[in-house]
Amino acid sequence: MTAWLMRRLAAAIAGVWAVVTLTFLLIHLAPGTPFLPGAERPADPAVIAELRARFGLDRPLPAQYVSYLRELVRGNLGVSFARRRPVAEALVEAIPNTLVLAGAALCIDFLLGLALGIYQAARARRAADVVLGNATLFFSSVPTFWLGLVLLLVFGQWLRWFPVGGVTDPVLYSSLPWAGKVADRLWHLALPALTLGVVGAAGTARYQRAAMLEALGQDFVRTARAKGATERRVLLRHALGNALLPFITLFGLAFPFLLTGAVLTETIFAWPGMGRLAAEAIATRDYPMVTAAALVAAVMVAAGNLLADLLLAAADPRIRVASE
């Protein structure tokens, strides 16, 4: 088991290194360069040359890459070109907001998806299953940015039930009691979390329905029914435990979806998280911020996949035996 875990950890580290290297190369080789002035604000070429020399952009690309890896090993993520501040400080402010959004979306994704999958399996090929099946197919096919814009327009602009952006109310938040502050944060979190969570829950429900139907066709389920077990007990005690293995696998796959979807969702709802930070950095050619955001995202995805592997090994004895 230890050797299996070390192999998984080594693969995760190699994956993070590959993502960082590819991001570094692509952002430097893409057309354009930082510090280019706009047409309305011309700048002295000498000033631009000085800035490029200060940040080491006038050196060959291999030398820049080696220098970046050296500083990365030391824990230095560099200084943001656009914000003129250490990248680590900007990420420390943004990452908690992204984790809150991703955590809320993950809860909606799996709780709603699991409940729908079980309900559909219990009523397979009936009217409720057909209606929910078509609904989950529709929502799993919807782009997150489109759903976010629809929710923002309907519930934020037309009905005014929810705020249209931000984490808290900029005027009232500081004067609210602690319960009011929590409610205000949840009020602002609702639409972004629903945007990510509903799309993910639709796909989770379809996977869980298929896994439950497969488990319900096994011999041990027929044996439980022959012994007089109620249908509720058969579903929740016998079939559900064996149908959770795909659910655990989806847990690891959800992290890339949440992080990539957060880029657009945070931009739409003006949510000050890592996705919005990365989008702004890409637009301004902020190389240190882009590579740092890719590094953090790769670490989070690798950690999620490693956790899913550990949970899968704990839930399925066959994996533990094979690893030994």
Image (cartoon, rainbow, N blue to C red):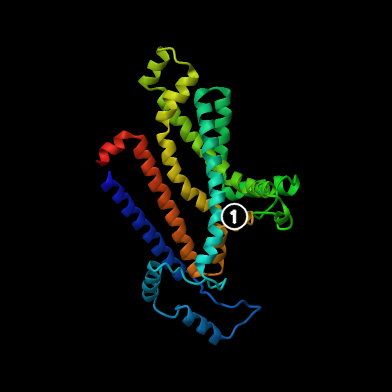
> Percent x, y for residue 150?
66, 46
Vertical arrangement, residue 207 with respect to residue 191, above or below? above
Identify residue for label 1.
266
Q: Amino acid at mark 1?
A: Glu
Q: Is residue 282 visible?
A: no
Mark 1 surroundings within 10 Å by alpha-carbon count, few (fewer than 14), some (14 through 19), many (20 or more): many
The spot of residue 162 in percent (x, y) is: 70, 47
Q: Residue at x 37, y 22 (%)?
A: 218
Query: Foreground: 260 or 8?
Result: 8
Q: Residue furthest front?
A: 177
Identify which residue, 269 or 176, lies in the foreground: 176
| Residue 196 locus on image (x, y percent) | 56, 46
Up/down of 315 relative to 293, above or below: above
- Quadrant of residue 46 within the rendered picture: bottom right
Quarter residue 47 falls in = bottom right
Identify the residue at horizontal 43%, vertical 25% (top origin). 239
In the shown orientation, is residue 105 left or right of residue 160? left
- Residue drawn at (41%, 62%) of the image: 20
Please provide percent x and percent y for residue 246: 41, 36
Q: Which element carries disc 1, helix, strand or loop?
A: helix
User: What residue sits 51% from the left and 52% below the top?
Assistant: 259
Quadrant of the rendering where the C terminus is positioned: top left
- Using residue 293 as the reference point, say whether residue 310 is left or right of it: left
Q: Residue furthest left?
A: 324
